Structures are given as C-alpha cells and as structure tokens.
Image: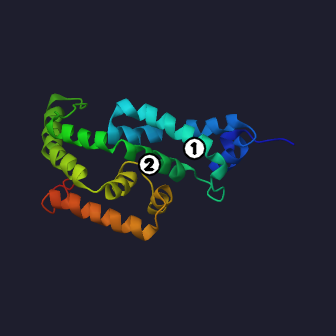
Amino acid sequence: MITQPATRGADSELVSASWTEPEAFAELFDRYSAMLYRYVSKRLGPEPAEDLVGETFLVAFSRRRSYDLSYPDARPWLFGILTKLVSRHHRREAARYRALLRAPVDSDVESPADRVAAGVSAQAVRAELAGALAALPAKDRDVLLLIAWGDLTYEEVGRALGIPIGTVRSRLNRGRRKIRAAFGGTNPMEEE
C-alpha cells in the first residue's frame, strides 16, 4: 500500500495517520504554529506565546485519538485548545492590557511623517481599546479575538470553544457593542 505524503492530506487525515505514524502530526505544527503564535502573542505578548503554542501541540498530540475526523480542518480544534490554555493565563492577559494603557506606541513606520501620524492615531485609540478589551468578560473577549485576530469564522469559533453558533453571534455582538461604547459609539477604524 502506497501512502500519500503528509503535506498533501487534510488535517483530519494527518491526525488519523498520526495514530500509527506519530511523525505525521508534525505537519499540523508546520501548518498552524505560526498562526497560533501570532494570535496568542497578541493576547499575552511574545514571551509566553512560544510556550503556549508548544503546549497546545502537546495537548493536541496527546488527545489526537479523540479528534472528530469528520472535520477536515483542525484549526478550530487547535484554537480551542489554545484558548483554554490562554484562559489559565488570564491574569497576565489583563495585566498586559493594563500595561498597554501606559506603554508608548511601537513605531514600525518608514518615514518620519508617517511615524508621527501613525503614532498619534495609534496612541489615540490604544488606551481606550486596551481598557475596553480588559473590561470585557473573558467569554466575550475570546469570541471577539478569535474572529478578529485568529481569523476564524463563526462556525470555527463555535467548534473551538464548544458553543453553539448563536452563542458565538451573541457574544460577538455584545463584545462589539461594548468596544464601540468605549469609543463613544463610533468605529475608530473608520475615517470621518
């Protein structure tokens, strides 16, 4: 019997293959570790991100036999594991948001004029956004950030958190309303 290289299979096929060939699971790491790292580093900062991503894959590997193979995409499963690990670090996350309130804006912009304009714009909304995110209930914040920073769909967020899509919609709506209220009912990303 000839087996396909792991790089061509759906995620569910990789998980299934890893039951007898554990090294097949490494392809999931290659596919999603950078995406998970970006997401968690935005939430908790870069320091714990690498450890949490590694821990996510250790947990996923140990639970791979319980993965529902009817889902070809493992991203929601992995984001769900990561989100649960992040919840353990909630105090650090809240402290990071409080620190963002006091921190100067990073300047990765090329020209001095762009740097000044970007700094003024970012500084204007950064403190309010950090405060609004910190004030959200963790369940609402998880949904909002999985959609905004994790680029997951409503269905994928529901699978990641083990909640119905209606709950995803209501938590997202509530989170957006509270963020919008922190900005005086306006969207800070829209130009006037």
Work out whether 183 lies above or below 91: below
Q: Is residue 14 above or below residue 115?
A: below
Name the foreground residue: 108 vs 66: 66
Q: Residues within 10 Å of mark 2 (few under 14, many from 20)?
A: some
Q: Quadrant of the N terminus?
A: top right
Q: Type of residue at label 1?
A: Ala
Image location of residue 181, percent across then percent down: 17, 61
Residue 122 locus on image (x, y percent): 18, 42
Q: Is residue 9 visible?
A: no
Residue shown at the point (38%, 47%) measured from the top left: 87
Is residue 165 placed above or below 146 in the rendered structure? below
Circle 1: is it few (<14), some (14-19), or many (20+) Cα within 10 Å? Answer: many
7 left or right of 181 in image: right
* Relative side of 55 to 70, left or right: left
Q: Which residue is mark 1?
A: 60
User: Among all residues in the image, which is located at the extreme bottom?
Assistant: 166
The mark total stands at: 2
* Residue 185 appears in view: yes
Decide which of 91, 32 is in the foreground and name it.
Answer: 91
Apparent side of residue 7 relative to residue 50 in the rendered image (left or right): right
Task: Give the residue number, with chain letter if any, for mark 2.
Answer: 84
Please tell me whether mark 2 sits on a helix, a strand or a loop: helix
